[in-house]
Image: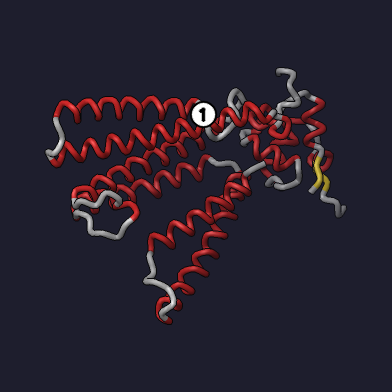
Amino acid sequence: MKNRLRVLRAEREWSQAELAVQLDVSRQAVNAIETGKHDPSLPLAFRIARLFDMPIEDIFDDEQA
Amino acid sequence: MMNKPDIDAENSSLRPAVLRVTKLVIASALFLFSAGLVTGGTMAVVDGTANPLKAAGILSVGTLIVVASGWWFWKLKPLGPADEPISASTRRTRRYFALSLGFGVLLGMGFAMSGLINGDPASLLSNEAIPRTPALALSAAYIVALPILGWLWHRSIDEHENAANSKGALAGIYAYSMIAPVWWVGERAGYLPPQQPMTVFVIVMIVWGLVWAVSRRA
């Protein structure tokens, strides 16, 4: 699943580790989501959406819609 | 928030990473060497074969190096780059992991000591007989601690770590499903030696650990 996490993080000038602290996950988890190696669960996707104050579908693209 | 968008794993330079890994290897080697020194010294005292003054000196220096190298290893943050902020759950996960490692080292030392009582200097790697009382005590400690530490660790990990661990566990089950029956058949057909449960266990754990480590690496 594609996502805009890296772009949104860069816009706020956050490192992966800083974003990981805000989401209460590991830096490896953030990197895995950004590179598409791990699709976040719904609860984590909602946490990400709340953090960036955006709807989930503006961050994640399921490429089938 | 600090302005450091480029502090990602893929952007970190190679030289500090190599230096850090070198320090971690030295700290680990010092820890294992001094743990062995303390184990051997303790057994010499138990057997009554050591000069008391010399044994006291060896045990004191050994214990000091165990504590110092263990502290150095911990301060090097072996599970992540130094100076990087970490989340509360990641901190908890690392604590439980370190606790499990420490418990494993203590169990290993206890096992080695119980083997030494019977004159077996490498009981961790052999199938020789060991005394019943320490064997029962170590087995009970293992059976009680493993599910508790495992439960605490599983509660603290994030979903990415959990997915990586699950992949490793699945690979481990497949490894076991292949090794155990094939070895059993090979033994019965006479082209393989008798099956060694701990050898199978170690192989399964290595497969699990490798797949887990590769999956969590990002």
Give percent across and percent down for residue B205.
48, 55
Give whichever of A59, B143 is nearer the camera: B143
Residue at image coords 27%, 44%? B110
In this picture, residue B92 sits left or right of residue A41: left
In this view, which residue lies farthest toward the right?
A65
Residue at image coords 59%, 55%? B167
Residue position for label 1: B23
Q: Label 1: chain?
A: B
Residue at image coords 30%, 50%? B122
Which quarter of the figure has residue B2? top right
Give whichever of A8, B94 is nearer the camera: B94
Q: Amino acid at mark 1?
A: Lys
In this view, which residue lies farthest toward the left?
B48
In this picture, residue B210 sits left or right of residue B64: right
In this picture, residue A2 sits left or right of residue A17: right
Q: Is the residue marked by circle 1 packed among few (<14), some (14-19), or many (20+) residues within 10 Å?
A: some
Give percent across and percent down for residue B212.
57, 50
Residue at image coords 76%, 42%? A35
Give whichever of B149, B77 is nearer the camera: B77
Give percent across and percent down for residue B44.
18, 38
Give whichever of B90, B19 is nearer the camera: B19
Q: Dot 1: what SS?
A: helix
